[in-house]
Image: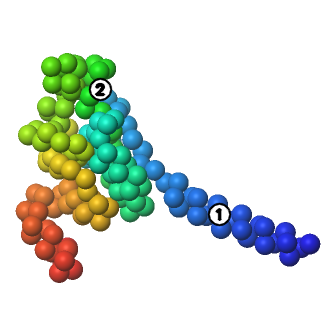
Amino acid sequence: MKSKFLMAFVLLLVTASSFAQTAAEIKWLSITEAEKLMKKNPRKVVVDIYTDWCGWCKRLDATTYKDPAVVEYINKNYYAVKFNAESKDPISFQGTSYTYDPSRRINSLSNLLMGNSTGYPTTTFLNEKLEVISVVPGYQQPQMMNNILHYFGEDQYLTKDWNTYLSSLQNGNQ
């Protein structure tokens, strides 16, 4: 009897431990929430710009944004914003109200956040002053997203171009 109880207890611990490892999630915010938090504790912002119909956006959510290294780095170093480019809700950001543009079927905040990018998903990085640092279009696999997050999160972009930074990672000199 004790042995069955012990086996069940060990199985429960292993299951709980496994669940805890996979249960970590990115703490997504709205752009308005991130802007409020920036006033007390400035940090960079990563903005996931998506649409409900975008298959690659769903894949990014299911894979890259579930990767433990990506989740941990984002939660520790960024405010993470999830922004539906087709949101019909008015959004206030930096004193400006952005609204839905029916002729283009997007919220006008998308123009600011996406620059010249026209596809989804798009990941936009903002500095501590909420200025666009870079716009990264398309799906990114977890390892590449992790590299990109570190590049901006550690201010490498201020002293190295992207290709030099990638080369330094491949050569083990970061």
Q: Position of residue 108 (x, y in %)?
A: 18, 25
Q: Earlier in the sequence, mark 1 or mark 2?
A: 1
Q: Quadrant of residue 7?
A: bottom right
Which element carries disc 1, helix, strand or loop? helix
Q: Residue at x 31, y 45 (%)?
A: 55
Q: Position of residue 146 (x, y in %)?
A: 29, 62
> What residue sits right under mark 1 in the picture?
15
Q: Nearer the viewer, residue 2 or 36?
A: 2
Neighbor class of circle 1 (other Cα within 10 Å; few <14, some 14-19, many 20+) is: few
Are the residues at dot 1 and dot 2 in contact (C-beta closer than 8 Å)? no
Placement of 39 over or under 138, stated as above or below: above
> What residue sits right under mark 2 in the picture?
87
Q: Residue at x 22, y 42 (%)?
A: 120
Furthest toward the bottom, the residue is: 171
Q: Nearer the viewer, residue 1 or 139?
A: 139
Q: Position of residue 29 (x, y in %)?
A: 37, 37
Q: Amino acid at mark 2?
A: Ser
Which element carries disc 2, helix, strand or loop? loop
Placement of 108 over or under 150, stated as above or below: above
Neighbor class of circle 2 (other Cα within 10 Å; few <14, some 14-19, many 20+) is: many
Q: Is residue 45 visible?
A: no
